[in-house]
Image (cartoon, grey):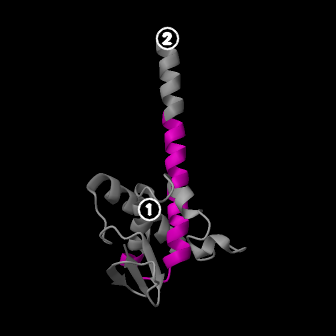
Amino acid sequence: MRILALIAFTLLASTSVAENLSQELECLARNIYFESRGEPVDGQYAVAFVTLNRVEDPRWADTICDVVYEPSQFSWTSRNNTSINEQVAWTRAQTIARSAYYQYYHFGEDTTDGAVFFNRGRRQRYHTELKISIGNHNFYS
């Protein structure tokens, strides 16, 4: 009987972990889509890496969704309309989210060299060090 309970618990836990990861990747894909869908693929990866760097940085929340939806961090989260209207761009964002997550957590890859900020245009005073520029975005530590 204990073995059956252990198997059931393991299956439930596995399902819960998979569902949680799926939700986290959805948040990452949404951030990529709304922040950088018009940027080169390298720039979309960079947005993903900034998000993941924030998860690992003690100044931000511990989950992707909490980082993405933290108030005043990503401009798109305060908009009323966050409908996904460009299917090709959405599919690309989902693919990049999965790939960036895997590269980051399995191989330590981060093309931004630890950047935790990005913007379009001029440097903001809280940005300390320009790490890389890709497309229309600049990435900072």
Instruction: Report helix, strand or loop for mark 1.
Output: helix
User: Looking at this view, is 37 or 77 the one in front?
Assistant: 77
Q: Image point 47% across, 84% down: which residue?
A: 124
Q: Is residue 26 visible?
A: no
Q: Is residue 17 above or below residue 73?
A: above
How many residues crowd around disc 2 within 10 Å: few (fewer than 14), some, or many (20 or more)?
few
Q: Is residue 42 above or below residue 25?
A: below
x then y, percent, for residue 71? 62, 66
Amino acid type, mark 2: Arg
- Magenta range is 14-43
Instruction: Report helix, strand or loop for mark 2.
Output: helix
x then y, percent, for residue 76? 61, 74
Residue at which label 2 appears: 2
Whether 32 is among the magenta residues is: yes
User: Looking at this view, is 13 or 108 the one in front?
Assistant: 108
Q: Quadrant of the C terminus?
A: bottom left
Residue at which label 1 appears: 54
Q: Image point 36% across, 83% down: which residue?
A: 134
How many residues crowd around disc 1 within 10 Å: few (fewer than 14), some, or many (20 or more)?
many
x then y, percent, for residue 128? 37, 77
For residue 130, what is the image quadrant? bottom left
* Comes first in the chain, label 1 or label 2: 2
Amino acid type, mark 1: Arg
Instruction: Classify residue 39 as left or right of residue 67.
Output: left
Q: Is residue 50 visible?
A: yes
